[in-house]
Amino acid sequence: AATSSYNLIETSTGGKLNRHNLHIQQHGSDRVTELSTFHLAGSNRAQDLHSRLVLDHPRGYGRTSQVHSADSSGQAIFDGNIQVN
């Protein structure tokens, strides 16, 4: 709907391998998208986030905040893309 918003708040700390593929595309003007993630990879664990935000119309707004942390044997992986058309 016009002037709609989408907010994602995600925390991930467990699992041997966690992967989240996130693709968001705004399909109209005056949309707001906010993404906040915190991923913590402990011993021999992997946290993997791939995000893509596409702003397709005028006055689209996007804000992202990602925090990734790993101990000496963990992996924190982030691949992010914001496309403004």
Image (spheres, grey):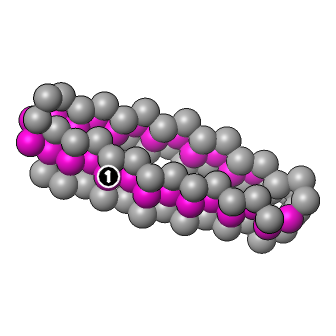
In which quadrant of the rendered view does residue 45 lie? top left
Q: Main secondary structure of the magenta part?
A: strand
Q: Residue at x 67, y 41 (%)?
A: 63
Question: What range of the chain is rendered magenta?
Answer: 32-57
Specify the quadrant that holds the N terminus.
Answer: bottom right
Q: Residue at x 76, y 59 (%)?
A: 84
Residue 56 falls inside the magenta stretch: yes
Q: Horizontally, is 79 left or right of 36 in the view?
A: left
Q: Horizontally, is 5 left or right of 80 in the view?
A: right
Q: Residues within 10 Å of mark 1 (few under 14, many from 20)?
A: some
Residue type of the residue flagged with mark 1 = Asp
Q: Horizontally, is 1 left or right of 81 in the view?
A: right
Residue underneath mark 1: 48
Front residue of 33 and 69: 69
Observer able to see residue 13: no
Front residue of 85 and 56: 85
In which quadrant of the rendered view does residue 29 lie? bottom right
Q: Picture coordinates of residue 8 (x, y %)?
A: 54, 48
Looking at the image, residue 1 lies above or below residue 18: below
Q: Secondary structure at mark 1?
A: strand
Q: Picture coordinates of residue 42 (x, y %)?
A: 16, 34
Specify the quadrant that holds the C terminus.
Answer: bottom right
Residue 54 falls inside the magenta stretch: yes
Q: Picture coordinates of residue 81 (x, y %)?
A: 57, 55
Front residue of 72 and 56: 72
Q: Residue at x 64, y 45 (%)?
A: 34
Q: Residue at x 18, y 28 (%)?
A: 71
Observer able to see residue 44: yes
Q: Horizontally, is 60 left or right of 20 in the view?
A: right
Q: Picture coordinates of residue 79 (x, y %)?
A: 44, 52
